Image (spheres, rainbow, N blue to C red):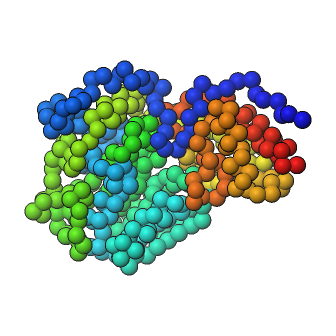
Amino acid sequence: MAIEQPAARPANPRFSSGPCAKPPVFDLAKLSDAPLGRSHRAAVGKAKLKDAIEGTREVLGIPADYKIGIVPASDTGAVEMAMWNLLGERKVEMLAWESFGAGWVTDVVKQLKIDAEVKTADYGEIVDLSTVDPKNDVVFTWNGTTSGVKVPNGDWIADDREGLTICDATSAAFAQDLPWDKLDVTTFSWQKVLGGEAAHGMIVLSPRAVERLESYTPAWPLPKIFRLTKGGKLIDGIFTGATINTPSMLCVEDYLLALDWARSLGGLEGLKARADANAEAVHAFVYANDWIENLAVDAATRSNTSVCLKFADARIQDGAAFAKAVAKRLEAENIALDIGAYRDAPAGLRIWCGGTVETADIEAMLPWLQWAFEAEIAAQA
């Protein structure tokens, strides 16, 4: 017997965790001011890039003495740039509880060959942050995009720390509070919470990080695309709009539009409120249905952007196949696109709840999720 479909449909079925949904105000026509066919080093290009940097500072509340740079290769490039430039001066602790954090461990241990202390936790859980030694450098993700587990706060980071904190914040920036006084290097990308275009990353350096860059030279060679210093001094142009490699001015224009939209919401507080409302809608659905659960075990560490779910029904014979089938049904109906769990994560679903997503679309999608679950249970019976 066919399972009856819900009447309402999401206006926008895009719940991908990256690249994420564009802001509701997006329109290609609004990018017409992009200086296409012009050098990014011309005055107009430099001005746009500086606007992107200072707009980021304004919306996120980044301190005036922190350096903000636009770098190549998205968040991945920004994190690796930080690790290749800064690590090796003192002992390193690597914290990982999901796929991307595990990737940074691989880079440090196998590529840089640093004898790091590696602390891991299973998907859905988080490492014991109280064990981090403030004398050491530490590398960690703030929000685990593939596990739905976030750092609850920065209280575990000592104010008088000797080591540097290197934080991959790509699915947290513009949706969660980041304590800048606790973070020495912070990285993120445009294609996450603000729904920008891919391939560009951001790196934010505290004065302590700049001091390390200018006083320490790593033992390994640095490719040109990673170099942040010259002659023992920070290349200041990177942080005023003179990028290391050629940026897409169309992508820059798109990011500027997203920043303007963020300002119209009241900045970070407005973005956080939208993400919170979206995540709460999903969590309320989970609480009301015993066949689905949050992957994140502790409510205090549950993400408000990348909400990861797992099925919990004894009738399911093959969890991975079942989750893929549910996601496929939702995509076929144009209800929810790209919501399967990350390939390295436990079988389940991942629903992006960042601020560019409308809560009404989340609320319209969830009854369809129940429909897809019941239809797949019936199909396997």
Residue 3 lies left or right of residue 336; in this view the side is right
Residue 133 lies left or right of residue 276; in this view the side is left
- Residue 3 in view, yes or no: yes
Q: Which of 349 and 65 is in front in this view?
A: 349
Q: Residue furthest top?
A: 29
Q: Residue 1: where, in percent of width, then height?
A: 90, 35
Q: Quadrant of residue 147?
A: bottom right
Quick check: 180 above or below 33? below
Q: Residue 169: where, in percent of width, then height?
A: 42, 51
Q: Which residue lies furthest to the left in this view?
A: 231
Q: Residue 107: where, in percent of width, then height?
A: 39, 68
Q: Which residue is drawn at 46% across and 29% down?
A: 23
Q: Nearer the viewer, residue 127 or 320?
A: 320
Residue 16 lies left or right of residue 30; in this view the side is right
Q: Which residue is drawn at 42% across and 45% down?
A: 173
Q: Which residue is drawn at 59% across and 32% down?
A: 13
Residue 96 lies left or right of residue 241; in this view the side is right
Q: Which residue is drawn at 72% across and 34% down?
A: 368
- Residue 176 in view, yes or no: no
Q: Residue 258: where, in percent of width, then height?
A: 38, 31
Q: In which quarter of the image is residue 11?
A: top right
